[in-house]
Image (cartoon, rainbow, N blue to C red):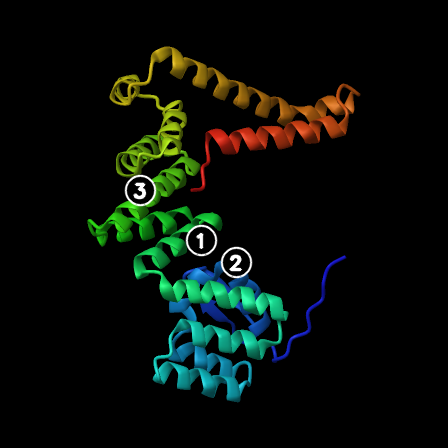
Amino acid sequence: MSELIFCSFPCAAKPYYLESAKQNIYSIEELCYFLQDNIYLLEENIMNASFCDWVETELHAKELAATLRGLLKSRKGFYAFCMQIIMDSGYFSRNEMQFLGMKLQKMDHQSNYENRKYKADQFMERGLYLLAISEYRNLLLNATNSPSDIRVSGDIWHNMGTAYARMYCFERAVNCYEKAYELSHRVDSLKAASRAACFLEDNERLQWFLQRNHIKPEQFAIMKKNLDEVIRMTQETDEAPQAQAGGAMPAEEIADMGRQVDAWKEEYIGYKG
């Protein structure tokens, strides 16, 4: 059964637009629902005078708006700003407030570079791949030669490769995964590059990739065969409901196969680092 949530403040006639998330919100409760899993997308969206004005004029929450303006003026930071909204909303349980408070404190203690990386990761999770790639590239332009930045840069290249792979831009995906492997030496990045390389149409580029990474042709052939099997089973899964109409395959078996193929597809094509 679905849960009903009663709003503590009026719903807005005019929504507030969260630019980073490409989403309108109409209430404090809707904002709270969003920030549970997307907290890294919010800072530049709500920590400004325009948001405070919206809270006052649209939600008629004058006291909250005044408090938020005071926090802005005194430069208290995102932790204090967001926690004020969380506490005033009445949306969260005590345990949920403590959990979000820890996440916000973690943001305060992380570098700006790391926080922006998490923001790009949330674009990825929401399927906003072009926005994620743009944010990743901006991060790489500002990276330093410090060990921490080099480590994070390796993760960024890997995730950018995943974004390209999910858009079927496999040449670019391979390039990104290889760069990730050069920086972090993560075996997962080399494996992801190999899987993306299975989709390359340029045989010369493929051979260069295998030689560069010391991958034996027979090893690659086995991987390609396994991937072809995944694709074949995916096609059979798509056709299975039609077979079921003739009594050829039970519905539960179709569902189990679909879940298994989805898992394999995630393993071979998509990697979320």
Crowd band around label 2 with a 10 angstrom C-alpha radius: few (<14), some (14–19), many (20+): few
Please, what is the three-letter code of the amino acid marked with disc 1?
Answer: Gln
Residue that label 1 marks: 122
Q: Secondary structure at mark 1?
A: helix
| Quarter of the picture holding the N terminus | bottom right
Residue at screen point 51% across, 64% down? 35
Q: Earlier in the sequence, mark 2 or mark 1?
A: 2
Residue 105 place in picture, x, y as percent: 43, 67
Quadrant location, the C terminus = top left
- The type of residue carrying mark 2 is Asp
Left/right of residue 117 with respect to residue 18 in the rendered view: left
Query: Can residue 27 be spotted in the picture?
Result: no
Q: Mark 2 and mark 1 in contact? Answer it, CB < 8 Å.
A: yes
Find disc 2 in the rendering and name its residue. 37
Category of crowding for the residue at label 3, using alpha-carbon neighbours closer than 10 angstroms: few (below 14), some (14–19), many (at least 20): many
C-alpha gap between disc 1 and disc 3: 17 Å
Q: Is residue 102 left or right of residue 76?
A: right
Query: Does residue 65 appear anywhere in the picture?
Result: yes
- Which is more foreground, mark 2 or mark 3? 3
Image position of 109 with respect to 197: above or below? below
Q: Position of residue 124 (x, y in %)?
A: 44, 48
The residue labelled by disc 3 is 154
Helix, strand or loop at mark 2: helix
Which of the 4 image quadrants contains residue 119?
A: bottom left
**Mark 3 residue element:** helix
Question: What amino acid does circle 3 point to?
Answer: Gly
Q: Is residue 223 above or below residue 80?
A: above
Question: Badge 1 local density, few (<14 within 10 Å), some, or many (20+)?
Answer: many
Disc nearest the viewer among 1 and 3: 3
Q: Nearer the viewer, residue 252 or 16?
A: 252
